[in-house]
């Protein structure tokens, strides 16, 4: 087995990368390969024969995915993380009505009749092309004009659900390996009931080939509901156990690099 190295994109908008880098230095006595936004923009990737596991902003990781010598470092299948790709597998866990439509078409739909005065709108992708927001239906026309350059993108519209608490659960091969409440501190551990729901969601997605996932679960009226699915290379760890996160990422990296031998 070759040496396994972390390639970490340090960026102020993604503080989790600094947490992981700091843990590697302090506790594992390992110096990660660090890249910055200039490196990413100019395609200055490390010339190494070591096995790599990547962690950082989605901007950096999607570009690393396009660099074949190191693309194995990325576990996330960003195209499969579109809501329109995975909702059909996990809709029983959502617990709310939703629809997909072109963003620019939203003002022309009878959304008030379908969902009421308030709706939740988000991008189909994880790229946050426009803000995910709760809107009044009468405000929708003006709001869509504000982001009209995304009018042909697919949007997700759903009824509004308020969450009393939210938890990020990291799962590998359908099994929870770390997680915490999010987004606000103080962070708390993920209750066993939430872990079980997250594992059920991850296992339902096993047929898609996505075996490394974040499963975000919210509590609404005392019941757990799926918030969304995400990847692991570009998702924040909040109060998760850093050692458990690193261990699972490294195990997955070794498995994937060994498959290339």
Image (cartoon, helix red, strand yellow):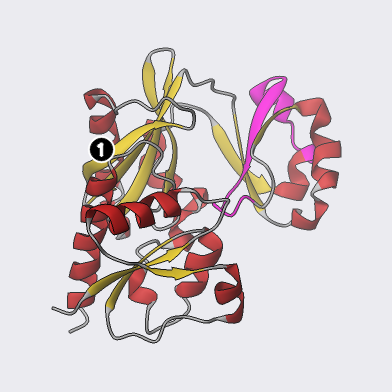
x 68%, y 55%: residue: 153
Residue 238: percent from left, percent from top = 41, 39
Is residue 116 located in the magenta-colored stretch of the structure? yes
| Quadrant the N terminus occupies | bottom left
Please name whichever residue, 35 or 73, is drawn nearer the observer in this view of the structure. 35
Viewed as shown, does residue 45 lie left or right of 134? Answer: left
Residue 40: percent from left, percent from top = 56, 73
Which range is magenta? 107-128
x 44%, y 58%: residue: 80
Please name whichever residue, 229 or 258, is drawn nearer the observer in this view of the structure. 258
Residue 13: percent from left, percent from top = 57, 50
| Quadrant the C terminus occupies | bottom left
Q: Residue furthest left?
A: 1
Residue 20: percent from left, percent from top = 36, 53
Residue 4 lies, with reference to residue 10, above or below; the image says: below
Please name whichever residue, 122 or 22, is drawn nearer the observer in this view of the structure. 22
Please name whichever residue, 59 or 222, is drawn nearer the observer in this view of the structure. 59
Quarter of the image for residue 222 reads top left
Viewed as shown, does residue 22 lie left or right of 117? Answer: left
Count of marks placed on residues: 1
Badge 1 element? helix
Which residue has dot 1 on it?
A: 200
x 74%, y 55%: residue: 150
Residue 174 lies, with reference to residue 182, above or below; the image says: below
x 69%, y 23%: residue: 118
Viewed as shown, does residue 41 lie left or right of 207? Answer: right
Q: Is the residue marked by circle 1 packed among few (<14), some (14-19), or many (20+) residues within 10 Å?
A: some
Is residue 205 located in the magenta-colored stretch of the structure? no
């Amino acid at each position: 087995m070759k040496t396994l190295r972390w390639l970490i994109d340090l960026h102020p908008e993604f503080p989790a990368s600094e947490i992981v880098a700091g843990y590697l230095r302090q506790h594992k006595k390992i110096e990660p390969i660090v890249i910055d936004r200039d490196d990413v923009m100019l395609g200055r990737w490390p010339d190494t024969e070591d096995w790599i596991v990547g962690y950082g902003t989605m901007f950096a990781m999607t570009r690393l995915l396009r660099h074949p010598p190191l693309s194995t470092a990325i576990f996330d299948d960003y195209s499969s993380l579109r809501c329109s790709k995975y909702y059909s597998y996990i809709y029983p866990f959502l617990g709310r009505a939703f629809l997909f439509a072109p963003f620019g078409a939203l003002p022309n739909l009878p959304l008030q009749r379908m969902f009421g005065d308030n709706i939740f709108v988000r991008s189909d992708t994880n790229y946050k092309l426009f803000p995910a927001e709760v809107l009044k239906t009468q405000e929708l026309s003006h709001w869509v004009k504000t982001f009209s350059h995304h009018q042909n993108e697919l949007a997700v519209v759903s009824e509004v659900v308020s969450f009393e608490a939210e938890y990020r659960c990291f799962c590998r091969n359908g099994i929870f390996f770390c997680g915490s409440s999010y987004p606000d501190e103080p962070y708390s551990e993920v209750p066993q009931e939430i872990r079980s729901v997250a594992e059920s969601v991850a296992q339902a997605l096993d047929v898609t080939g996505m075996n490394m996932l974040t499963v975000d679960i919210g509590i609404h009226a005392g019941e757990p509901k799926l918030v969304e699915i995400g990847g692991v290379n570009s998702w924040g760890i909040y109060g998760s156990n850093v050692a458990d996160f690193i261990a699972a990422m490294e195990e997955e990296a070794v498995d994937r690099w060994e498959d290339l031998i």
